[in-house]
Amino acid sequence: MYDLVVLGGGSAGFAAAIKASELGARVVIVNAGLPPGGTCVNVGCVPTKFLVKAAEALRWAQAYFPEANLKPSLRRLLAEAAETSAMLRKEKYVDLLDYYGIEYIEGRGVLAGPGRVMVEGRGVLEGKRVVVATGSRPAVPNIKGLGEVGYYTNQRLFDLGEPSSVAFVGGGAVAVELAQALNRLGVKTAIVARGRLLKYEEEMASQFVEEVLKEEGVEVVRDEAVAVRRADGGVEVETRAGRRLRAEALFVAAGRVPNSEAAGGLLELNSDGSIRVNKRLETSMPGVYAAGDVAGGVWLRGGRYAENAAARQGTIAAVNALGGHEEYNPAAVPRVVFTDPPVASVGISEDEMIASGIGCRCAAVPIDVVAAAWASKRTSGFIKINTYPETWRVSMKGGKIAGAVVAAPHAEELIHVFAIAVKLGLRIGDLAELVPAFPSFGEALRAAALAFEKDVSKLSCCAG
């Protein structure tokens, strides 16, 4: 009898297993499909960001040293990305099994009842508690001819080879990140998306990313792909408006589908197929918890999945499964799209605040108000802060910070200051009193706070 049976070997599953082991529990992970580490390490965050960073380095090398005549090899970069994923898979997942004394079973597991998991080829495992953390997989849209032409998803990223052109279907993070990166690496790219890019981010950020992509030569088509067919050794994508785009390869990045089949039809699901959970990550079955991509009901912005959130959920699920009383709060969990510049956000968006009737007192500043932007020749971007309007009337330190968007160099790092601000209930005055390093992009955090009261473009360096 195990204290905890964990279904799934990704970030949520491993976080749950490690925390349970630390608490003295006997734990087993049952995993099938992707190797230990799940999507992020094997075919998601790690290899895609490897390409993003390589493409970014190439772009700046070409800008500063055009005489170098650098010629990237996508095939070689994909091989190096695969090696990096393999190294992290071993060091951050496989090696930890022995370190924490966690048993690992390779096989498809399905919930068979409270404390019971049926493992293919192994029979029934029994545990006092179960955490379902089976992740998600790429969604496959209903597009005529898609099954016949052959296409790539993030799970087939390493098979991409060296195409001359790639058409992406979908306008989310995977599509925009890879379209920009491949374009910089010499691959002609196009994105076909039904609506605006990055639909879960604020429209200001969405428009910014679209403009950046177009300026770099990525074709962005706001239309729905309705059919695909083979053409001239590649593929042709037809849109609802009759537009036809041709490319050597087709990449489908149209969202994710929760792997909720592991629930065995025994748990209550949400309309999107995810397992319904409460803030304690409890499912509809006593003693069974769910965490990560497969769990729903506690996400912000229509189901944005991320490894940091999944791991945190896994930890909380394990604590509660073993008798704790923790709740998951997504409000202070940052989200990042790794374009260049990246887009990062945290907390509540302006649209959400207005739709809920709260209203929003907001301010934004361009990133070029700080010297660091000019010193690094990276002057494109902005920082926007959202505050609760009513809180301005009750404090000398200004309004309480509800959320923020950073679309600027180093946004993936800068957003953590706003995550702390949201978590701790900080106010605009708290950021305005910051004394950041000079020259640094961190100065823009303070400038964004000062922008609620003054024109920051009229300040000298570090002043205010």
Image: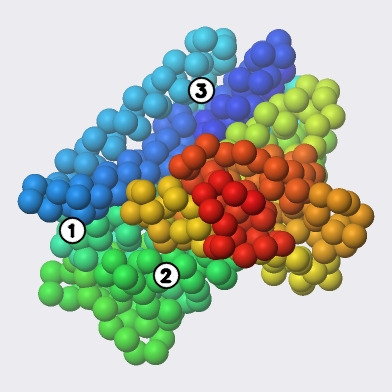
Query: Residue 79 in the image: x percent, y percent?
Result: 22, 38
Query: Residue 267 in the image: x percent, y percent?
Result: 73, 46
Please identify the quarter of the rendering in which residue 361 is found: bottom right
Callout 3 crowding tier (Cα within 10 Å): few <14, some 14–19, many ≥20: some
Colouring rule applied to residues:
rainbow
* Tag 1: amino acid: Gly
Name the residue at the bottom extreme: 242
The vertical placement of 120 against 214, above or below, is above
Secondary structure of the residue carrying tag 3 is strand
Secondary structure of the residue carrying tag 2 is helix
- Residue under pointer 3: 105
| In-image side of 430 versus 335 (left or right) | right
Tell me which residue sits at (19%, 50%) in the image.
64
Tell me which residue sits at (49%, 52%) in the image.
370
The vertical placement of 36 against 55, above or below, is above
Tell me which residue sits at (43%, 48%) in the image.
372
Secondary structure of the residue carrying tag 1 is loop
As measured in the structure, the alpha-carbon distance from the residue carrying label 1 to the one carrying label 3 is 42 Å
- Residue under pointer 1: 186
Give the number of marks: 3
Front-lying residue, 197 or 364: 364
- Residue under pointer 2: 210
* Tag 3: amino acid: Ile
